[in-house]
Image: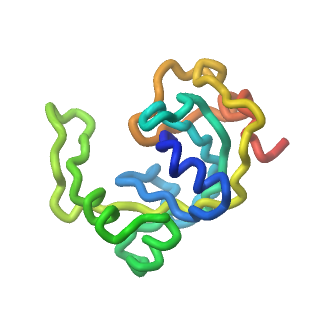
Amino acid sequence: MSIRARYAALILSGRKTLEIRKTAPKGLRESAEITVLLYESKREGGRGAIVGSFLCRNILPVTKMKVDEVCRRACLRREELQAYAERPQRIPGAESSTAVPGGKIYAWSVEAPVTFEQPIPLQEVGVSCPPQSWRKLRETQIAMSGGNRDE
């Protein structure tokens, strides 16, 4: 998952317990248990590397949750959440970014954050460019990062 440095720091400190995204993996939304590698984007002074991981057990549409709770747990102001929800989303196969009226936003739970001692370059897990938002990795790629919780 690609994330700005300030939000990565909040996740790794344990203060940010929800991450807001416009999409979620199909089949893993309501009762997930996935390891998420945290790629700190270069935007706003980030390191451009995988800096940690967290466990996600639930991914819920924000409409099922109280907005004030979502904002508090995601370390966002209501206006920031609204602006994100209204921002155009790139739809795969579309020629340009398109705003989808009434499009869902998802709250990914953030549990058991782990900060890596050394940031890991994407190339070390077999990825050549950072994800726009998130991407699925094979188990072998996760194991290469040290993010495999079954070890």
Residue found at x 74% / y 38%? 116
**Residue at image point 60% right, 50% down:** 9
Which residue shows up at 58% across the image and 29% down it?
49
Front residue of this view, candidates 79 and 1? 79
Q: Is residue 34 above or below residue 59?
A: above
Residue 70 rendering spot, x and y as whole percentages: 45, 72
Q: Nearer the viewer, residue 34 or 36?
A: 36
Q: Tell me which corner region of the image, top left, top right, bottom left or bottom right, holds residue 77.
A: bottom left
Q: How is the image coloured?
A: rainbow
Give the residue at the far front of this rendering. Answer: 45
Query: x, y percentage for residue 13?
Result: 67, 56
Left or right position of 121 against 22: right
In the rendered image, the vertical position of residue 19 relative to residue 132, given as above or below: below
Give the residue displayed 18% in from the left and 35% down from the top: 94
Q: Locate residue 99, reporting x and y percent.
A: 17, 51
Count of numbered tags: 0
Lateral position of residue 88 relative to residue 118, left or right: left
Q: Nearer the viewer, residue 69 or 108?
A: 69
Is residue 143 shown above or below 149? Answer: above
Image spot of residue 134 (x, y percent):
47, 41
Locate residue 14: give its quadrant.
bottom right
Furthest-right residue in this view = 151
* Image quarter hosting the C terminus: top right
